Image (spheres, rainbow, N blue to C red):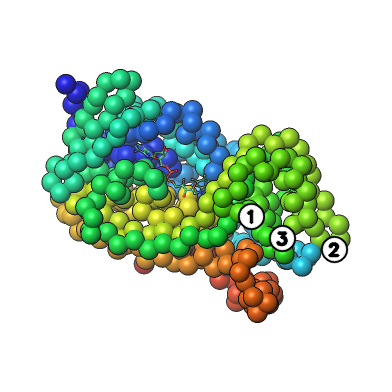
Amino acid sequence: MSARLRTQVGIVGGGPAGMMLSHLLQLGGIESIVVEARSREHVEERVRAGVLEQGTADLMIESGVGERLKRQGLVHRGIELRFDGRGHRIDLSELTGGRTIMIYGQNEVVKDLTDARLAAGGRVFFECDNVKVAGLDAKPSIAFTATDDSREIACDFIAGCDGFHGVCRPSIPAGALTTYERVYPFAWLGILAAVAPSSDELIYTSHERGFALHSMRSPELTRLYIQCAPDEPLENWPEERIWDELSQRFATIDNWQLQRGPITQKGITPMRSFVAEPMQYGNLFLAGDAAHIVPPTGAKGLNLAIADVRVLARAFEEFYQSGSRASLAGYSGACLRRVWKVQRFSWWMTLMLHRFDGDSAFDRRRQRAELDYVTSSRAAATSLAENYVGLPMDPV
Ligand code: FAD
Ligand code: DHB
């Protein structure tokens, strides 16, 4: 016998999309239950993205979960593009009428949201096994096992916020979704190092040996990424090799120095572009990585997940206030216009900055010209900047 629960919106996945959705629904007076496969510690310690668009940071603050972000987040007004041993600053703020980005770890976002949900009496189940969704066409339910008890939640709707490898998207009947995909022939090796950042701003560097990115989490913690082969085992990357490779890729003609320090975390992330259309089926709505993946070069994955649930929360509010399904019916269409623009930007940044082994001499020259253009034309730099700080969250 399984314990039966009931809620308005059952949310599968307690990452940024799921926890933000649950938080926004609560502010709108709508009940939800979050079902998360991993432990709370795991979700809160998982190091992933770190750049919040201004719209994402604003939403955290406006919705009452931005206190720590305001204290600890690092406001950045520009980024550097580095190639041929020279740095070129893109002044994001000046090019976008004063907009900025915020450096604040994704795990910190999840921590703030989880704290807020639990403090407000929200129901969140961690360490759930055998999660299954059913009844998508009519009366949806979520079944799972947690602390050895099986449970079933009857809901009005399900939000599939369970990431790329979750159960919600594959539960949609074959033929109801069309997927679009591009897999890149490389991955990113990401590290966290206990050393002060070597620059005040992010540095995206394009080098003969491959791409590298300098980012940070705090004045004492540097986050670095390096383009590597997709199938390369982590053991092939001892600390010495990582630092030597990074130093070569960041080298400048005026002898810029990368500070080294103890590596506290490392991992390899494959790179893909993926979209499932439509982002809904019956009473199931997909949001975030469950519906789409972008390569991380434009720092967009987390921001896109937050933009989706903002649209979804409003659609649920409209339904519960007026009974109208109009915004729910238009959810996928409203999100996909923005999703595809962000796909385009992430693909373009990836192509401009990475080394593709099969590239001809022509391709390399064209890539070099792209970097030259974007760092010397105000129009081109403005296009990069408006995408990087974030396209408007509200569908236009
Ligand atoms: P997720 O964060 O994936 O959350 C989904 C949640 O669902 C997880 O907590 C998962 O445990 C849970 N779940 C999965 N299956 C089930 C199930 N069956 N039942 C219940 N719960 C389930 N983006 C960037 O912009 N920059 C980066 O540097 C960057 N690095 C990344 C590194 C890695 C290893 C990964 C995987 C992604 C990275 N991303 C990065 C992308 C970014 O982190 C994601 O776009 C973002 O996490 C999307 O949020 P989400 O809530 O949609 O999905
Ligand atoms: C970070 C990640 C990104 O994908 C990116 O483009 C910039 C910064 C980061 O983790 O800090």
Q: Is residue 374 visible?
A: no
- Residue sitting nearer the eye, 203 or 323: 203
Whether the residues at callouts 2 and 3 have beta carbons within 8 Å, the answer is no
- Residue sitting nearer the eye, 241 or 283: 241
**Alpha carbon of mark 2 to alpha carbon of mark 3: how far?**
16 Å
Of all residues shown, which one is farthest toward the left? 138
Of all residues shown, which one is farthest toward the bottom? 362
Whether the residues at callouts 1 and 3 have beta carbons within 8 Å, the answer is no
Residue where numbered disc 3 is placed: 209
Q: Nearer the viewer, mark 1 or mark 2?
A: 1
**Alpha carbon of mark 1 to alpha carbon of mark 3: how far?**
9 Å
Q: On screen, 144 above or below 223?
A: above
Q: Which residue is drawn at 76% across and 38% down?
A: 261
Q: Residue at x 13, y 46 (%)?
A: 138
**Label number found at residue 28:** none
Q: Which of marks 2 and 3 is in front?
A: 3
**Label number found at residue 253:** 2
**Alpha carbon of mark 1 to alpha carbon of mark 2: how far?**
22 Å
Dot 3: what SS? loop
Dot 1: what SS? strand
- Residue sitting nearer the eye, 332 or 312: 332
**Label number found at residue 227:** 1
Q: On screen, 268 above or below 110?
A: below
Q: On screen, 325 above or below 118?
A: below
Of the numbered discs 2 and 3, the one sitting upstream in the chain is 3
Of the numbered discs 1 and 3, the one sitting upstream in the chain is 3
Image-quadrant location for residue 64: top left
Identity of the amino acid at label 3? Arg
Place of residue 178 in the rendered image (x, y in percent of width and height, measured from the top left): 30, 62
